[in-house]
Amino acid sequence: MTNIPTSFNAFRIHNDADGYRSGLEQIGIDDLASGEVVIKAAYSSVNFKDALAGTGEGKILRRFPLVGGIDVAGHVVASTDPKFREGDEVLVTGCGLSETRDGGYSQYVRLEAKWVIALPRGLGLRESMILGTAGFTAALALFRMRENRQAPELGPLAVTGATGGVGSLAVDIFSRAGFEVHAISGKPEHADYLKAIGAAQVLGRDALSTTRPMESARFGGGLDNVGGPMLASLLAQTIPYGNVASAGLAASADLPTTVMPFIIRGVSLLGVASAGTARDIREQIWTHLAGDWKPRHLDRICTREVGLDELPDVFANMLKGGSLGRTLVVI
């Protein structure tokens, strides 16, 4: 490991007798979790889970201290696994980063080879982290819906929380895949942004304000990032045999619904849990994201680039609901 300096910068999270805290510090390679592959990180990203972990607002980390950041992309500098060689461009999203093992907010990252994905042809390192877990989640939702016979002919797909990272990338990915997309947002000032990245219509939150078990069917399905009554309303407005993917709980972890959409219209509610996705599916998703599902508007969706030292401000803004699109972390 002669290519690796004795110390380097990392954004580390502690929880001990001195309290919960996070920030930039100097660490060495032996401070990192074990793994077969070491990369020099180029980029990471900021996801809602990162903001919860970095501030302690959510119980994300299973042990302390850990380096934050659930995503990372960079170049291999050392590997004991023959599948990876020095200089290879790779990425990792989820897979226990910043939860059970050190994550991507570090100049050098040590990873388990079983989760490392070779950067697919057609995708750059920077693009891969504008996507990151958010883009992977949006694409996994589409993958699951397509597996369950979702098709453009069934009608428009609704995307709730559309101005966030997952929502923005879902709008772009779904429209790229041939679906009409209706973006649901409580931020009317960003309607032009949503239309520019692929939304055919931008609807206010009142479009999903119904509290009745069933409503007139208006959506072919959709992706929900907020939970609670909005998810229940989306289910109530989905056509027969449409699919709704659930990927977030920005508003609530509750689901105040009935069995009516399921037993009368055959609607399917599909869970989307990106962190532990099987490797074969993970590779398929990244192949799609580098090819036929690659968003057309990544540069527009990437609304901010920051360094590791700027992360606390980004976390605070995200938890207040002030973020738009994706924040790229340049390491």
Image (cartoon, rainbow, N blue to C red):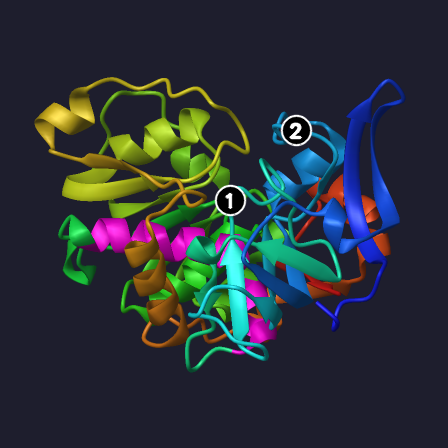
Say what amino acid the circle numbered 1 marks: Gly
Residue at the spot x=70%, y=47% of the render? Answer: 32
Residues packed near mark 1 inside 10 Å, few (<14), some (14 to 19) or many (20 plus):
many
**Residue shown at the point (64%, 27%) measured from the top left:** 58
Image: 48 above or below 228: below
161 relative to 42, above or below: above
- The answer to if 37 sits in the magenta stretch is no
Which label belongs to residue 121? none
Instruction: For mark 2, give the secondary structure.
Output: loop
At x 70%, y 67%, the residue is 1
Residue 114 vertical position relative to residue 117 in the rendered view, above or below: above
| Magenta residues (range) | 124-146
Residue plotted at (54% across, 78% down): 124
Q: Is residue 136 found inside the magenta-colored segment of the image? A: yes
Magenta span: predominant SS is helix
Q: Hey, which quadrant is residue 126 in on the image?
A: bottom right
Q: Which image quadrant: the C terminus? A: bottom right
The amino acid type of the residue labelled 2 equals Arg
| Residue 158 image position (x, y, % from top left) | 35, 48
Q: Which mark is residue 161?
A: 1
Of the residues tagged 1 and 2, which is closer to the observer? 2
